Image: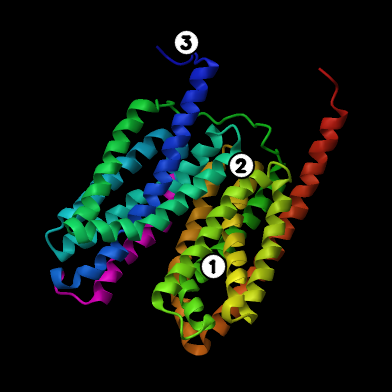
C-alpha cells in the first residue's frame, strides 16, 4: 500500500525523521573516518610492497581527488533519482571498496581499490546534507550535530586505525570498517523507506524565497565563498601542527605539539555545536558575517603572535573556521530554492574539497620561500576576501529578510 493511501501518523513521521537523521549523522562520521584510514596504514606498507613512503602516500591522491570531483554528478543523480537510494549505494559501495583495499594482493589492485573508496565516499556530502535539510524540523541544530559527527570521524580515525594495525594487522584496518559500512547499509535499507521519485518539498519557515536574479547572485557569491573558505580551511588545518612547532618554541616535544593541535581542533568541534544554538536567536546571515570578521581578526593575531600567546589565537581561528562551515550551510539552505539545493551543495562541496590539493602545493611553495610568516600572511589576506564576500551576501539577503518581514506585517489575518 502506498504512503499516500496510508499516510503516516505524526508519531511515525517523527520516528522516521529521527531514524533518517541518525543514519545521516552516522554516515558523516564513517565518511570522514574511512578517508583517513590509509594515511595511518601507509606507515607500515613500505616493507609489504617494497615501495618508498612517497610512492605509497601518493596513492591516496586519487581518492581525495575524486572525492571532490564527483560531488557534482552525485548531487545531480540524487536530485533526479533518489537521495535515499544514493545513500544506500554510499554505505554498500564504500564498504565493498574498503574490503577490496584490505584484500588487495598487489600494488595495482591497492591503487584501484583506494580510488574506489574515494568514488563512493564522494556520495555523502552532496546527497546527505540536502537530505538532512529536507528532513530536519530544527534545521540549525540538526546541521550542527551533523558537523560534530563528521569531526568525530576525523578525530578517531588515526587512533583506532593504529590500534587495529598493531593488534591484528593492516588489512583488518579496512576489513572492520568495511563490515560496519555494509551492516549499516542493510539496517538503513530496512529502517528508512524509499520515498519513490523525490518530490521537491514546499518552502518552510526556514526558507526565504528570493526572486530568480537575486537567487543567482547569492548562489554565485556563495560559490566564491566556498572557494575562499576552502583555501583558509585547508591552509590552517594542514599546517597547524607545523605552525605550533615553529612558533611556540624549540623545546616543545612532538607529543606536546600533537596534543596542542588536537585541543585546538576540539575548539572547532565545540564551535560547530554552538552555532546551531546561536542561529536560533540571531539571523544566520548576520552570524555568518560576524564569524567571517572574527576569522579575519584571529588570522591577523595568529600572523603576529608567537610563543604560548599563539594558542588562544589559533583556537579562535579554528573555531571560526569550523563555525563558518556550519553557518554557511545553514544560510545556503535558507536562501537556495529546494529544487536547486542538491546541485548547489554539490558545487559547494566540489569547490571546498578540490582546494585541498592546490592548497597543499601552494603551502609547500610558500613555506620554502618564507616559512610560517608568509603562509599565515597569505592566509590572512584570503580571510579578508572571505570577510568582504560574507558582508556582501549579508547586505543582499538582509534586504530580502526585510521585505519578508514587511510582507508578513501587512498580511491579512486568517
Per the image, label 2 sits on a secondary structure element best described as helix
Q: Is residue 53 magenta?
A: yes
Kindly identify which residue carries mark 3: 5
Predominant SS along the magenta part: helix
Could you tell me residue 397's position as x and y percent?
74, 48
Task: Give the residue drawn at x 74%, y 52%.
Answer: 286
Task: Measure the alpha-carbon separation of dots 3 and 2.
Answer: 32 Å
Could you tell me residue 322's position as x and y percent?
56, 58
Kindly identify which residue carries mark 1: 231
Q: Compare marks 1 and 2 and give the one earlier in the sequence.
A: 2
Task: Give the residue drawn at x 45%, y 50%.
Answer: 150
Q: Which residues are magenta?
A: 49-74
Kindly identify which residue carries mark 2: 140
Task: Give the residue drawn at x 33%, y 26%.
Answer: 190
Task: Measure the alpha-carbon separation of dots 1 and 2.
Answer: 25 Å
Could you tell me residue 125's position as x and y percent?
46, 48
Q: Nearer the viewer, residue 6 or 235?
A: 235
Q: Which quarter of the image is occupied by the N terminus?
A: top left
Amino acid at each position: 500500500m502506498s504512503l499516500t493511501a496510508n499516510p503516516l501518523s505524526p508519531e511515525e513521521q517523527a520516528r522516521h525523521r529521527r531514524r533518517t537523521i541518525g543514519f545521516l549523522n552516522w554516515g558523516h562520521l564513517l565518511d570522514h573516518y574511512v578517508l583517513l584510514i590509509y594515511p595511518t596504514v601507509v606507515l607500515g606498507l613500505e616493507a609489504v610492497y617494497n615501495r618508498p613512503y612517497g610512492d605509497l602516500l601518493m596513492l591516496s591522491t586519487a581518492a581525495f581527488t575524486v572525492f571532490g570531483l564527483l560531488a557534482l554528478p552525485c548531487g545531480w543523480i540524487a536530485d533526479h533519482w533518489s537521495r535515499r537510494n544514493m545513500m544506500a549505494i554510499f554505505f554498500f559501495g564504500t564498504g565493498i571498496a574498503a574490503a577490496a583495499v584490505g584484500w588487495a594482493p598487489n600494488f595495482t589492485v591497492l591503487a584501484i581499490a583506494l580510488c574506489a573508496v574515494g568514488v563512493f565516499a564522494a556520495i555523502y556530502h552532496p546527497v546527505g546534507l540536502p537530505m538532512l535539510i529536507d528532513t530536519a524540523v530544527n534545521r540549525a541544530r540538526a546541521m550542527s550535530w551533523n558537523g560534530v559527527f563528521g569531526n568525530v570521524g576525523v578525530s578517531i580515525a588515526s587512533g583506532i586505525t593504529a590500534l587495529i594495525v598493531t593488534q591484528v594487522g593492516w588489512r583488518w584496518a579496512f576489513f572492520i570498517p568495511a563490515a560496519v559500512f555494509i551492516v549499516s547499509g542493510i539496517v538503513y535499507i530496512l529502517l528508512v523507506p524509499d520515498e519513490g521519485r523525490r518530490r521537491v518539498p514546499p518552502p518552510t519557515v526556514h526558507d526565504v524565497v528570493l526572486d530568480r536574479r537575486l537567487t543567482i547572485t547569492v548562489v554565485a557569491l556563495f560559490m566564491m565563498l566556498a572557494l575562499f573558505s576552502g583555501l583558509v580551511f585547508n591552509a590552517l588545518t594542514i599546517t597547524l601542527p607545523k605552525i605550533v612547532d615553529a612558533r611556540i618554541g624549540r623545546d616543545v616535544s612532538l607529543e606536546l605539539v600533537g596534543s596542542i593541535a588536537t585541543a585546538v581542533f576540539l575548539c572547532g568541534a565545540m564551535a560547530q555545536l554552538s552555532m546551531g544554538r546561536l542561529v536560533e536567536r540571531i539571523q544566520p546571515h548576520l552570524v555568518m558575517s560576524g564569524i567571517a570578521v572574527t576569522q579575519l581578526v584571529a588570522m591577523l593575531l595568529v600572523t603576529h603572535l608567537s610563543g604560548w600567546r599563539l594558542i588562544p589565537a589559533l583556537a579562535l581561528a579554528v573555531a571560526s573556521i569550523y563555525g563558518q562551515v556550519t553557518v554557511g550551510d545553514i544560510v545556503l539552505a535558507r536562501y537556495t530554492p529546494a529544487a536547486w539545493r542538491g546541485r548547489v551543495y554539490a558545487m559547494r562541496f566540489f569547490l571546498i574539497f578540490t582546494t585541498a590539493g592546490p592548497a597543499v602545493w601552494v603551502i609547500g611553495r610558500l613555506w620554502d620561500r618564507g616559512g610560517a610568516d608568509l603562509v599565515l600572511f597569505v592566509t590572512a589576506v584570503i580571510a579578508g576576501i572571505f570577510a568582504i564576500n560574507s558582508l556582501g551576501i549579508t547586505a543582499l539577503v538582509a534586504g530580502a529578510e526585510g521585505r519578508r518581514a514587511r510582507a508578513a506585517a501587512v498580511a491579512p489575518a486568517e
